[in-house]
Image: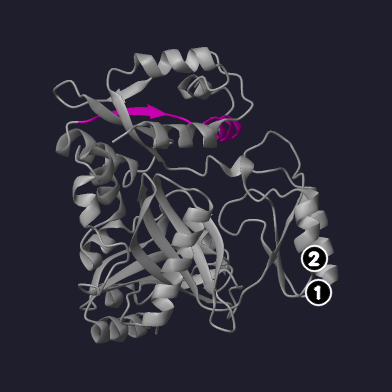
Amino acid sequence: MSPTPPLLYVLYILSLPFLISTFTPSYTLPSTPPTVGILVIDGFSPFHSAYLRDLAVNDYSAGVVNALSPYTARGLRQTADAGEAEDYESHVPPLGDPSKLKAWLDAIPFELVGVFCESDAGLDFSERLSLEVSSAYASFVPPVIVKPPIGCASEGVFLCHERSEAVEASRHLLSQTEWGKFGTPNPSVVLQEYLPGPEFAVDCVSVNGVHKVVAVWSYVKTDAGFGPFAYLSTSLSCPEDDPPVFWDVCRCALSGLDGLSFMNGLSHAEVKLRGDGEPRLVEVNCRQHNANVLPLTKSCVGYDAVEVLAEGYLSGEEGGGGFKEVPPIPGPLRRRGTILHLQCPSSGTVLSLSGLGEISRLPTVVDMDFYEDVFGVGCSVQVTRDIRGDAGWVVFTGGREEVERDYERARE
């Protein structure tokens, strides 16, 4: 497999006007000298990048180069405690100097055959349209979403039903600091069509432009006292649920990857259905979910995104070895899988808790976590507004009827 397409793609994504001094690679290596390896950018997750490193080193005897993107290094420096001496920029490849970059690449003691980026390192380039393009497509058909060009989850996201609300939200955002920047105000705001229909996330793995849908997630949100961005459940979908919708959603996500010339790595695309049933691609995130959905995917689908990516990159076989055997779009699930998001119904001080023990004993519950240090008795809490305000989660797997029964019981 040629290392050129994935490496150039990530270097393009990370090419920011950022001056770098020196960069010393950090390696994760097998017991014997590797001949091939991968580049891991912003690999902080204990269940994504750590999992990939383990697969690379132990299953494929491959090496791993660990590095930071300029975007993440800047964000870490911004949020670092006063007096912290960590020089984050020293972990960034010398992207601003072609000769230094070539020297760095030449110094790596094995061939790079793939890359894995765990952050939104390309956000500096996202959702920024020229005035001409913006004007050509501009319209105001309420309700609309007003949000900053860079953000996290639904931070700074407003659902506006009137023009006056959109103006007020825009003025507020223009006075706020841009995420990941040092005191720089938001240079613009994004006005986005609001689609109230069903919402899906499509997890894909791409190797040399060949895409595989690994999992399709159906989101249920509720605004009953929580606002429009609070998750109620996240469930794995399959063709049996609604074959035309399932296939249309998958094709929409795959066409988006092709349209963006996305070649290598993990992605998850957000797709929503319009009132007429047509899918609409909302966004493509060039990384895996922040949540650890891999065990649930492995249990219900039979494989997960990270192991499929590792096989595509590191098998050493033409076409990616077992990667080519993975179907482009998954078929029936082995078992059903659903995540219930535990929501905090009101703001104030928690006086008592009940029901958690009963939930944990439900037959199809395989894992759960309640954030007791934040939502336990005596804690001061805020009502859940989005996924960052969840009080915990519950994972259900099993037969369809059994999962639905236990899910409804847990909600009670």
Using the rendered view, name the quadrant where residue 244 is placed. bottom left
Q: Can you say whether 170 is above or below 187 in the image?
A: below
Where's residue 253, x and y in %?
46, 63
139 on left or right of 153: right
Where's residue 389, x and y in %?
52, 62
Given the image, on which type of amino acid does mark 2 rest?
Ala
Where's residue 81, x and y in %?
56, 30
Q: Can you say whether 265 is above or below 43 in the image?
A: below
Confirm whether residue 72 shows in the render: no
Q: Quadrant of the C terminus?
A: bottom left
Q: Secondary structure at mark 1?
A: loop
Where's residue 24, x and y in %?
41, 16
- In the rendered structure, does residue 336 fall within the stretch colored magenta? no
268 on left or right of 192: left
Dot 2 crowding, Cα within 10 Å, few <14, some 14–19, many 20+? many
Marks 2/1 in contact by CB < 8 Å: the verdict is yes
Q: Give the residue number, with chain letter if any, for mark 2.
A: 166
Q: Residue at x 80, y 48 (%)?
A: 175
Q: Give the residue number, with chain letter if any, for mark 1.
A: 162
Q: Residue at x 26, y 62 (%)?
A: 327
Using the rendered view, name the quadrant where residue 112 is placed. top left
Confirm whether residue 319 shows in the render: yes
Cα distance in 3D space between marks 2 and 1: 7 Å
| Camera-nearest residue between 139 and 227 | 139
246 on left or right of 228: left
Q: Can you say whether 250 is above or below 315 in the image?
A: below
Q: Can you say whether 111 is above or below 335 in the image?
A: above
Image mark for residue 321: none
The range drawn in magenta is 62-79
Given the image, on which type of amino acid does mark 1 rest?
Glu
| Camera-nearest residue between 355 and 241 | 241
